Amino acid sequence: MLNRTPNRPRPARRRPLPALELAARPSPWLRALGLTTVVLVGAWLGLLVVGNVRAPVGPMDTTMALRPSLSGGTKINVSPLGSLSLDSHVAPVRLDVNVDQLDPLRSQALVDHPERLSGLQDEVTRDVEHGTLDLAVRSCVAVVSGATALGLAVYRRPRRAVAAGGLALALLAASAASAYATWNPKSVLEPRFSGLLSSAPSVVGNARSIVTEFDVYQKELARLVTNVTKLYDVTSTLPAYRPDPSTIRVLHVSDIHLNPASWKIIGSLVEQYKVDVIVDSGDTMDHGTAAENGFLDPIRDLGVPYVWVRGNHDSRTTQRYLERMKNVRVLDDGRAETVAGLRFAGIGDPQFTPDRSTAPGSAASEQLAGDRLASALRDQRTAGTPVDVAVAHEPSAARETDGTVPLVLCGHLHHEGTELLRYGTRLRMEGSTGGSGLRAVEREYPAPIEASILYFDRDSRRLQAWDAIKLGGLGLTTAEVSRHLADDNQPGATGTSRSPSPTPPSASP
């Protein structure tokens, strides 16, 4: 018989295993977050690259742009005077308007025909409307193009890229709707000023006075336009000069009062006169706040040492900020330093009056500061290290050094002058290198911009001559350079320097 194997159950067919996914799909929230990031970054890059519009506004050439912002509003930059901000709207975009320059032809037409000022408001309004319309069109193109291009680069899918561009356009439309719904036309009457323009209300008046005394405001506006039109022209009239290489050349500046145009003038003088060292006799600032410290940064780029003493508009905060700059030598409490071959000593102003107030006993405090400086100068001479140049801010303090130093420099009064004191010390007072700041436009005749080049003999370290430089202020383009010789350098002089008397006046208590 054949052996029959028992029937075994057939094995069940194995079902194929489901294919394993290589990676889990990201959640919808992450996809949305990624797309939003691409849209925002692409839109911002588009606005940054091609979202600017150059447009004439009245007598000004401006550049308009939209920028991302959490609070919205409008910011108008009027270089070099500062900026003003308006709470014009609430939206995630801010309107930036940069005043690049005043067109000489259009500005001169206003000066020659002041009756046109009556229609200036309508003209400016039309110009702003046209510029804003052009900016809106360009911004739409910039936002959509930027988001679409970045979406294509990130996702490499045309549909995703188109979706990114569409979302960017929707966000821009929503921002425009928000700006339109929250538009505040009265914001122009309550601007926030910064820089030199922080004093603008005192020049052009507040909103109430503008409304009630519009005729007066028009005249002030006309003068302001006239003066600011030629602000940059003054430096172009400076004459070229070839200095004697055997002398030490010192540039004396003072009372800059937060005028950023001064740095351009100072840089031009340093280059043209081959200046060895700059001496600043104070009031570089206007209020001495920490927010103003950034104004001092161009000092680093002047390329020469900068000797500085504190004025009554400069704070201790200002002084500490300058002390951290490598090329700055801050002089205070009679401290002496040798810079560029000359020995300087100085003292900071004992007063801090940024609001132009006069503190009780101010005259006595200035005299006491001068006495302290004179005492330090006598100590230096006794130690065999006599000082060549003393520096103070107030002339009343500088006069107390008579007989202890050949030359003392000061400022404060916003006009230049030279005085040979009783005991042989020469006092050299500098005018305002900042043209009195924005206060230059308060008067009918703007304050001039003044500085001096002092020439010292390299061997004797005595003053030989000085050039008084006067620029014609904001509304004028004149430049005057006058040469002055020290007494011992006059024709027919014996050539011997007049030394300070060894018997100076006794110190006051």
Image (spheres, grey):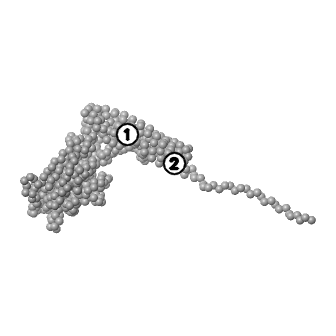
User: Which tag, 2 or 1, sits closer to the chain's start?
Assistant: 1
Q: Image check: 13 left or right of 332?
A: right
Q: How many marks?
A: 2
Query: Which of the two discs, 2 and 1, sits closer to the camera?
Result: 2
Amino acid at the residue labelled 1: Arg
Looking at the rendering, in which quadrant would you find the C terminus? bottom left
Looking at the rendering, in which quadrant would you find the N terminus? bottom right
Give the percent coordinates (x, y) of residue 289.
Answer: 29, 53
Q: Quadrant of residue 339?
A: bottom left
Which residue has dot 2 on it?
153
Q: Residue at 65%, 56% (x, y): give it.
A: 20
Which residue has dot 1 on it?
54
Give the percent coordinates (x, y) of residue 276.
Answer: 23, 56
Give yes or no for contact between labels 2 and 1 (Cβ–Cβ under 8 Å). no
Q: Residue at 31%, 37% (x, y): give it.
A: 59
Q: What is the distance, in whole Å, between disc 2 and disc 1 at their CAs?
A: 30 Å
Q: Quadrant of residue 233?
A: top left
Residue 133 in view here: yes
Q: Residue at 43%, 43% (x, y): give it.
A: 50
Q: Image check: 18 left or right of 384?
A: right
Q: Residue at 20%, 49% (x, y): give it.
A: 241
Give the percent coordinates (x, y) of residue 19.
Answer: 66, 55
Q: Image check: 68 left or right of 201?
A: right
Give the percent coordinates (x, y) of residue 178.
Answer: 45, 41
Amino acid at the residue labelled 2: Ala
